[in-house]
């Protein structure tokens, strides 16, 4: 059966060729033309495709040949280096052989020229030099440590440093006051415990202002930073003046953070900002905002509603008129100002007064901060009446000695002065200009009421 199938297939192929020839013979010339063109076009396309493949292979072969040339060059260099190293190795071997031969044929003579002996002193270590170097190194290390500590901690260490670098007297050193649970006037040291040792510093400050040789009946108080205690110092100082029989007026000119107004619990009262915005006669406007606090001879003008332009209000003509009015009706006028580095209000107000006191907290204030604040005062031509060192502690070894048999040092702690819990405790502010003593504002001509 398989053989029969093969025979049938062969017959079919033979008949296929015959039929194909018959069909080709039957075709005319017009029918064969397109067929031949298509066949030739197909061959041309195949030839072009083959040409492109050959070109690609040629490019790849050319690239490989270039790479092989580079490798051949590297190989040639390596072979040359190998040959050079072999030549060098052979040369060294020859020299070593010659040296060995020469040593075998030569002899060395050894003779003692001088007998050795031990020295009288050890050659090393040289004790005198070691001692000198150790002394120098110790001094250098000590000075370096002192210098680094001074850079890290640049606070004032004594009243003499404050006086020398600020060029202004230290009027008083106020002790760290005890904590009090009371609020308002009852929280003030001069009111709660006038006979205590801590209260004596405010009387000392009062006396120092009286004997400075300057006319200081209108004085501002400021600090370099918030929380240095200027408001507490001013409030107690005002009470000290009132207890001495002086008619005293305290003006809260800190229109941004009125600590004095909070201390005397007058935040809801009209005050300085109302007077400065009012168009009334100054005497009538001032009379409506002067408040008593239950202490004879002491009146307060609170800050009033907080304005949006405090510096503009304080620098206006109304502030000058208010100061002139206060001078005619009071023996002593104090103005509580914002920290000098926080705002320019303090310098603006102080130019209208006889001088300004700077509250310094030696435990907290850095010297460079205090000096920067003093430079601001100098630039505004404000007279620095003196410095108050605030919150002096009990450490006797810190350079802040205190009179009356008490060796007070400086320090700080949390005290209750009637301020809000969310407000930072008032503390001393340090300003460090050693040149402020040269600032002399124009003399002020007073008009005292008969």
Image: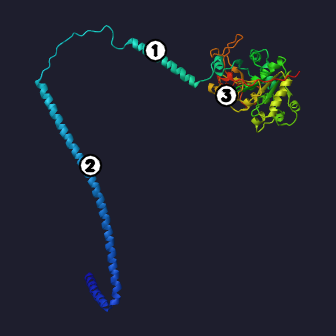
Residue located 34% across and 78% down the image: 41
Please tell me which residue lies in front, 434 or 381. Answer: 381
Task: Please tell me the numbered disc located at residue 200.
Answer: none
Question: Relative to the observer, which residue lies in front, 57 or 70?
Answer: 70
Q: Give the residue at mark 3.
A: 373
Q: Is residue 155 left or right of residue 103?
A: right
Query: Mark 2 vs mark 3: which is more N-terminal?
Result: 2
Spatial CA distance of label 2 from label 3 is 75 Å
Horizontal and vertical percent for residue 8? Answer: 28, 85
Q: Residues within 10 Å of mark 1 (few under 14, many from 20)?
A: few
Q: Which marked residue is nearer to the observer: mark 1 or mark 3?
A: 3
Residue drawn at point x = 40 percent, y = 11 percent: 128
Percent x, y for residue 165?
A: 63, 21
What secondary structure is marked by label 1?
A: helix
Instruction: Kindly report the distance in space between the C-alpha atoms of the residues bearing marks 1 and 3.
Output: 42 Å
Residue at the (32%, 64%) spot, across then down:
56
Which residue is at the front of the view, 321 or 48? 321
- Label 3: few (<14), some (14–19) or many (≥20) C-alpha neighbours in 10 Å: many
User: Which quadrant of the structure image shows residue 107?
Assistant: top left
Residue 271 percent location from the top left of the image: 83, 32
Labels 2 and 1: the sequence-earlier one: 2
Q: Quadrant of residue 31?
A: bottom left
Quarter containing the C terminus: top right
Above or below, 180 relative to 32: above
Instruction: Determine the secondary structure under disc 3.
Output: helix
Residue that numbered label 2 is attached to: 74
The part of the image, by quadrant, that contains residue 30 is bottom left
Q: Quadrant of the N terminus?
A: bottom left
Asked if residue 412 shows in the view, the reply is no
Give the residue at mark 1: 135
């Amino acid at each position: 059966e398989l053989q029969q199938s093969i025979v049938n297939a062969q017959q079919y192929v033979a008949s296929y060729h015959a039929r194909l020839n018959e069909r080709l013979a039957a075709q005319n010339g017009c029918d064969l033309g397109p067929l031949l063109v298509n066949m030739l076009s197909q061959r041309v396309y195949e030839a072009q495709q083959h040409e492109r493949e050959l070109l690609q292979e040629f490019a790849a072969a050319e690239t490989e040949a270039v790479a092989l040339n580079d490798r051949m060059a590297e190989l040639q260099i390596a072979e040359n280096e190998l040959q050079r190293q072999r030549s060098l190795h052979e040369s060294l071997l020859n020299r070593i052989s010659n040296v060995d031969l020469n040593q075998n044929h030569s002899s060395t003579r050894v003779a003692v020229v001088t007998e050795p002996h031990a020295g009288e002193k050890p050659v090393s270590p040289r004790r005198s030099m070691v001692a000198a170097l150790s002394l120098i190194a110790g001094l250098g290390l000590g000075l370096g440590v002192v210098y680094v500590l001074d850079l890290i901690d640049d606070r004032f260490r004594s009243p003499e440093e404050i006086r020398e670098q600020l060029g202004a007297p230290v009027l008083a050193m106020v002790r760290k006051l005890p904590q009090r649970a009371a609020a308002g006037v009852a929280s003030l040291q001069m009111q709660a415990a006038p006979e205590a040792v801590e209260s004596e510093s405010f009387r000392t400050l009062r006396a120092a202002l009286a004997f400075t040789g300057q006319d200081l009946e209108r004085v501002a108080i400021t600090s370099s930073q918030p929380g240095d205690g200027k408001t507490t110092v001013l409030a107690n100082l005002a009470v000290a003046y009132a207890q001495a029989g002086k008619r005293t007026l305290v003006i809260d000119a800190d229109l941004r953070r009125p600590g004095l107004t909070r201390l005397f619990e007058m935040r809801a009262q009209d005050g300085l900002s109302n007077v400065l915005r009012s168009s009334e006669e100054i005497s009538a406007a001032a009379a409506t905002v002067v408040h008593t606090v239950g202490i004879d001879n002491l009146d307060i003008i609170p800050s009033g509603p907080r304005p949006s332009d405090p510096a503009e209000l304080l620098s206006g003509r109304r502030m000058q008129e208010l100061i002139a009015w206060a001078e005619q009706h009071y023996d002593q006028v104090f103005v509580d100002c914002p920290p000098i580095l926080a705002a320019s209000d303090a310098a603006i107000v102080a130019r209208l007064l006889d001088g300004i006191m700077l509250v310094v907290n030696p435990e907290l204030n850095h010297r460079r901060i205090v000096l920067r604040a003093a430079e601001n005062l100098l630039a505004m031509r404000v007279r620095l009446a003196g410095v108050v060192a605030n919150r002096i502690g009990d450490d006797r070894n810190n350079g802040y000695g205190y009179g009356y048999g008490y060796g007070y040092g400086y320090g700080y702690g949390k005290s209750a002065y009637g301020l809000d819990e969310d407000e930072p405790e008032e503390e001393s502010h340090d300003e460090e200009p050693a040149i402020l003593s040269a600032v002399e504002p124009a003399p002020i001509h007073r008009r005292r009421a008969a």
